[in-house]
């Protein structure tokens, strides 16, 4: 698999406004990577 992400750039851009922007506690990792992992599981 050449692309490790399940979401395309366009899909990620559409989800971006729905994701939280404030950092609380541990610094955030790449949202696209996290959501792709959730979809895979």
Image (spheres, grey):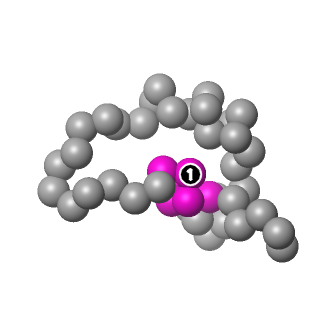
Residue 29 shown left or right of residue 1 in the figure: left
Query: Residue 31 location in percent, x, y?
Result: 48, 51
Q: Residue furthest right?
A: 1
Residue 26 in the image, given as x and y percentages of width and height = 21, 61
Q: Quadrant of the C terminus?
A: bottom right
State whether the magenta stretch is mostly helix, strand or loop: helix
Q: Is residue 16 above or below residue 33?
A: above
Tell how many labels. Answer: 1
Q: Position of residue 17 (x, y in %)?
A: 47, 26
The correct choice, above or below, for 21 with respect to 28 in the image is: above
Residue 19 lies left or right of residue 13; in this view the side is left
* Secondary element at image label 1: helix
Q: Is 30 placed above or below 17 here?
A: below
Reply yes or no: does residue 12 show up in magenta.
Answer: no
Which residue is drawn at the image coordinates 83% and 69% (left, top)?
2
Q: Identify the residue at the far front of this view.
A: 2
Closer-to-camera residue (15/2)? 2
Residue lying furthest bottom in this view? 1
Vertical order, 10 against 36 (above or below): above
What residue appears at the point 77 percent right and 64 percent down from the top-left corner? Answer: 3
Magenta span includes 33: yes
Q: Report crowding for label 1: few under 14, some 14 to 19, many 20 or more residues within 10 A (C-alpha).
A: some
Rendered image quadrant of residue 4: bottom right
Quadrant in which the N terminus is drawn: bottom right
* Residue that mark 1 sits on: 32
Res 23 → quadrant: top left
Residue at (72, 56) in percent of width and height: 6
Report the front residue among 18 and 30.
30
Q: What's drawn in magenta, residue-wise?
A: 31-36
> How far from the left and from the top, in percent, is residue 5?
69, 59
């Amino acid at each position: 698999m050449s692309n490790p992400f399940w979401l395309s750039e366009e899909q990620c851009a559409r989800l971006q406004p729905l994701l939280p922007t404030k950092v609380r506690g541990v610094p955030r990792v790449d949202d696209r990577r996290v959501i792709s992992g959730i979809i895979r599981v």
